[in-house]
Image (spheres, rainbow, N blue to C red):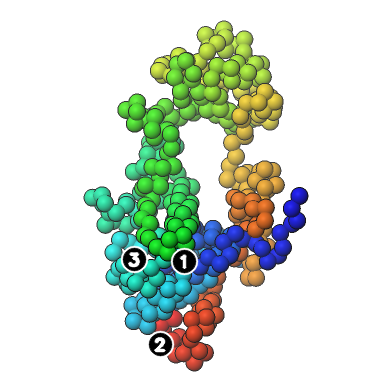
Amino acid sequence: MSAPPSSSSWGPLQGVRVVSCSTAQAGTVPWMLMADLGADVIKIETPDGGDSSRGMTVLPGKGSTFFETNNRGVKSVTLNLKTPEGRAILHKLAAKADIFGQNFRPGAAEKNGFGYEELRKHNPKLVYVSVSGYGTKGPHAHLPGTDSMAQALGGIAEAYSMPGQKMRTGIASVADESTAMLAFGGALAALLHARTTGVGQKIDLSLLGSLVRLMGWTFTTTMWRDQNPVTGQARITGTKERPGISASFNDRDGKPLVFQLVGPDNWRDAMSACGFWDRVCAAGFETIGSIIDSEAKRAELLALLDSLFATGTRADWVARLRGADIVSAPINTLLEASNDPDVVANGYVTHVDHPKHGKLKVHGTPWQFSETPAKPGIAPELGEHNDAVLSELGFGAAEVADLRSRKII
């Protein structure tokens, strides 16, 4: 058994340097995750107010939930990139960085002196990550993008839809977060290549492309069948010979649960565990292959199961199904999810001691490293690290004061 990690060994990305000219979520979360893992991340902000998301969802006594969640652990340096001096400082930072990230509207990075071709002159090893809305090659590549736009175009609205009801996008920023995770992985892959070969590169990814990837094998099935999937209360998958179903039902108190089955043995085990087997057989559902292509059969089966699950409690149904080795769970609200025993036990939600706001409940980390554990930080004040970072670049106190007086920082 290995010894516990020392206090100096937190974070497997110690020694990795990131500079980010990014806002919003898809552009900031990749570097926040790296900061959790020990990377030295410098966030560039404008001197006159900084990242506009500092003002989003500000709760009394707790600050901005948006900015804190997406920028914790990073350093804030303010630069006026419309000035030659500001751009020169950014170029010095890029020269010492491993990774650079930006998610400005297409063309803005080049206009403001931090496009890929410009920065690679100062650092040929630089991994440059650019996030856009639509991608770089399509008819709408020049347009700005948002999470809801990518959800709308990428097909996930169908996953939220119910037959007969309006299509809609969801409140969770799935496109932003998916893009952030892909940017995180792509940057590390390119960094490995750069450290092996000495050659950096540009990585382009988009909200739309990430959302399409998120749809996974369901997207493939849709393309191969050339028809939309079954949506609503149940997700029907597979074939008549080997059908699958993931469905949700309410208990007698209106509390929802879900179970997921693959194949005929799963179906019998689940229905037997709940005491439903005789009823479903009597209704002609000893197998459920007929629901694959028949909307009427699907409606009939779901109505029957609705009535059966409404006779007991969610806790009992979930316990019975899990006891039969069937995948089942209560359907949590977001608030319930934040207090779920598995979420809490694994540190997916934790607390930080904030110097201004006291003890705050926050995201933990999705990884558990045995030797170099992650360490969530807190979001920086605007320009909090100007002096320290500029000092590292060789600027003296008088020079920093001059830059500040001229509103370059």
Task: From the top left corner, tell me how far across and down residue 88 is, in percent.
Answer: 38, 80
Tag 2 and tag 1, C-beta contact below 8 Å: no
Q: Nearer the viewer, mark 2 or mark 3?
A: 3
> Mark 3 or mark 1, which has the lower sequence index?
1
The amino acid type of the residue labelled 2 equals Arg
Tag 2 and tag 3, C-beta contact below 8 Å: no
Task: Give the spatial CA distance, label 3 vs label 1.
Answer: 13 Å
Q: Which residue is mark 2?
A: 406
Task: Give the spatial CA distance, label 2 vs label 1.
Answer: 30 Å
The amino acid type of the residue labelled 3 equals Tyr
Could you say whether the residue bearing mark 1 is in a helix, strand or loop? loop
Q: Nearer the viewer, mark 2 or mark 1?
A: 1
Q: Which residue is mark 3?
A: 116
Quadrant assignment for the C terminus: bottom left
Q: Residue at x 69, y 43 (%)?
A: 341
Task: From the top left corner, tell me how far across and down residue 277 is, in percent.
Answer: 62, 13
User: Seen from this angle, which residue lies furthest left?
Assistant: 139
Q: Which residue is mark 1?
A: 98
Task: From the top left corner, tell me how far across and down residue 191 is, in percent.
Answer: 46, 59
Compared to 71, does 392 lie above or below?
A: below
> Mark 2 or mark 1, which has the lower sequence index?
1
Could you say whether the residue bearing mark 2 is in a helix, strand or loop? loop
Task: From the top left corner, tell me how far across and down residue 159 is, in percent.
Answer: 43, 36
- Of residues 266 and 303, the one nearer the viewer is 266
